[in-house]
Amino acid sequence: MRLIAFKNKRLHILLISLTMCVVGVCLSFLFFSQPTTPILLFSQKSFDPVLQSFITMHGRGAMPPLNFFRKYYDLYGPENILASLKKDQDCHERSHSMGQIIYEKIGDLANATLVCKNACASGCIHGVLMGFFGVKQESEVPFSYEITPAIREKILQTCSQNTVTKYIGIGNCYHAVGHAIMALVSNNIQAGIELCRLFHNSGPGAVFYCVTGIYMQRNIMLGAIDSMKEG
């Protein structure tokens, strides 16, 4: 009987020790571990009134500048802003600037693309690529640009990455690059087409889709200019 009681006592002590170890590990994790990424708390309020206020003030065809989305990004969050843009008839065009800000804030092509996915008929991803290539702002006013070897390499490699093509497909990826190229070269059509020819080794289809992005981006810019004149 004494032997059984002794064994039960040892078992009891062992269980208490194990419990204390587990509690100690949990407390250490709670008090001393740090999250690897910051947790951002975004407003749950709808972004709709903010977007409608901009349209009322600047006109239906007006495109928000980068500072507009930069101002509200941390307050409302990208998902909330995109949810409002998706309800807008000019979602595709307006989401270009939003995509640029998403890339600016995140700083990584894969994660920025993950936020956009195919929002606004891929307009958001078009903007992400503009940010990725270093476009500062879509503008009709010519600005100085330099196509460095690093930018050429980015252009060539973008559609070979599954991070983009898994959301919009390979053809639409080349098309998206065309949009970004046109903004990059300040709407210089010939310069844009020359950069699309970087894809010649990928076949005529790649060049074709890229050039369609060049001309669509030009149409977007001309449409925005016409809307401002009408306003």
Image (cartoon, helix red, strand yellow):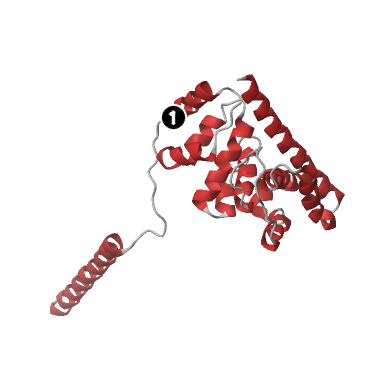
Q: Residue at x 44, y 38 (%)?
A: 72
Residue toward you, 106 or 10: 106
Q: Amino acid at mark 1?
A: Ser
Mark 1, other Cα within 10 Å: few <14 / some 14–19 / many ≥20: few
- Residue 77 visible from this viewpoint: no
Q: Residue 158: where, in percent of width, then height?
A: 69, 54
Q: Residue at x 39, y 54 (%)?
A: 38
Residue occupied by mark 1: 46
Res 220 quadrant in image: top right
Tally of marks: 1
Left/right of residue 93 with respect to residue 39 in the rendered view: right
Left/right of residue 138 with respect to residue 53 in the rendered view: right
Q: Residue at x 45, y 25 (%)?
A: 49
Q: Residue 181: where, in percent of width, then height?
A: 71, 47
Q: Residue at x 69, y 49 (%)?
A: 165
Q: Considering the image in quadrants, where does the C terminus appear?
A: top right
- Residue 169 visible from this viewpoint: yes
Q: Considering the image in quadrants, where does the N terminus appear?
A: bottom left
